[in-house]
Image: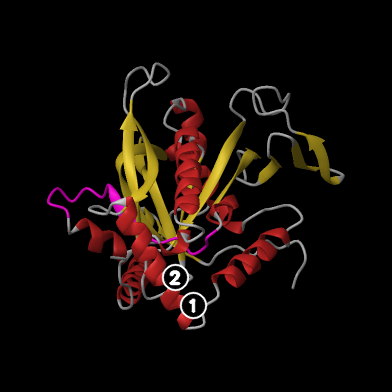
């Protein structure tokens, strides 16, 4: 195995609660009151929606996607939810420093260095919103691919705090059977003095609608026993995931570099418009050729058709 390469769960797509809009010739992030599920592909109009987005949206009368059935692929909550303080380079989207509140790894001209991590408010280079909590939640949506995940990236304290608490509680209540529980992502909103009483949306994870905790635990016990009878060893899967994360000297995920300017800016509900402009996507400039644009459109249609052929939402 290549040392220094973080082996993360296979990502099939993205989950976001923000979107990118066109304003005055610029692509700017904007908050939203619903989930959007996209593939990992972009065109000149932004991220291409994953077929699961329409499958789930069509079940709601108002076509608002505010809950998503999910399954965790790990029992250990910290393998599904990765969170730390992160300082990003605003130009490249590349992580420059990551810490846990005690120690941090910082990229410098001399290489990767270890430093104390006093939290963003007390860090001389992380103040004024430059360093933020950065979380990635990996969940399974597609019943046809047990290890394929969709990732929700966030810099919101509310989402990270709520997700961490819920996963820890469900893990304990189910006696280490988190991967067997029927869960769903739920979009919630609240108003605070810091948001000037305007809605701030964040992500929670709950039991699927209609399930009580006792019912969910009984179902998890049954599924856990079925997996063991089939020879599936969840503990071994968790162990390999830990090894994969630990393989990285400086935990940099390729997707982080690409998405930090769009996913993270759109998710930050309280950021000013001036800061938001740094979330524009300059990785995929628009083509000046009509012929090239037409060819790209045909390619996108073919990709969408291929994606739709073998997906099945969790139930």
Disc ID at residue 165: none
Query: At x 45% / y 56%, what residue is drawn?
Result: 174
Distance CA(mark 1)–CA(mark 2) = 6 Å
Q: Position of residue 175 (x, y in %)?
A: 49, 57
Viewer-nearest residue: 186 or 228 = 228
Can residue 174 be seen? yes
- Residue 159 horizontal side relative to residue 98, left or right: left
Can residue 262 be seen? no
Q: Residues within 10 Å of mark 1 (few under 14, many from 20)?
A: few
The stretch of residues the image draws in magenta is 60-75
Viewer-nearest residue: 127 or 67 = 67
Viewer-nearest residue: 182 or 41 = 182
- Residue 239 horizontal side relative to residue 154, left or right: right
Q: Residue beneath label 2, please?
A: 224
Q: Could you tell me which secondary element the residue under label 1 belongs to?
A: helix
Q: Position of residue 271 (x, y in %)?
A: 47, 27
């Amino acid at each position: 195995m290549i040392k220094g390469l973080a082996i993360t769960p296979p990502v099939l797509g993205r989950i976001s609660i923000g979107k990118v809009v066109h304003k005055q010739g610029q692509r700017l992030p904007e908050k939203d009151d619903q989930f959007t599920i996209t593939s990992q592909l972009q065109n000149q109009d932004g991220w291409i929606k994953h077929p699961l987005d329409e499958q789930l949206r069509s079940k709601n009368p108002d076509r608002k996607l505010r809950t998503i059935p999910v399954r965790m692929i790990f029992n250990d909550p910290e393998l599904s939810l990765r969170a730390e303080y992160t300082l990003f380079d605003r130009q490249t989207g590349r992580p420059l420093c990551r810490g846990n509140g005690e120690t941090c790894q910082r990229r410098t001209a001399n290489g990767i260095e270890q430093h104390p991590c006093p939290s963003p408010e007390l860090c001389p280079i992380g103040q004024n919103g430059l360093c933020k909590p950065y979380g990635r939640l990996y969940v399974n949506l597609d019943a046809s691919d047990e290890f394929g995940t969709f990732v929700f990236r966030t810099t919101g304290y509310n989402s990270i705090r709520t997700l961490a608490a819920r996963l820890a509680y469900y893990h304990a209540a189910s006696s280490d059977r988190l991967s067997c529980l029927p869960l769903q992502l739920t979009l919630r909103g609240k108003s605070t003095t810091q948001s000037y009483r305007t809605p701030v949306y964040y992500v929670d994870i709950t039991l699927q609608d209609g399930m009580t905790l006792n019912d969910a635990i009984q179902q998890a016990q049954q599924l856990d026993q079925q997996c063991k009878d089939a020879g599936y060893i969840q503990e071994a899967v968790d162990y390999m995931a830990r090894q994969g994360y630990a393989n990285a000297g400086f935990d940099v995920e390729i997707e982080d570099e690409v998405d930090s300017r769009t996913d993270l800016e759109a998710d930050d509900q309280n950021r000013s418009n001036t800061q938001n402009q740094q979330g524009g996507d300059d990785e995929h400039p628009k083509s000046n050729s009509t012929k090239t644009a037409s060819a790209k459109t045909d390619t996108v249609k073919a990709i969408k058709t291929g994606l739709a052929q073998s997906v099945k939402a969790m139930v």
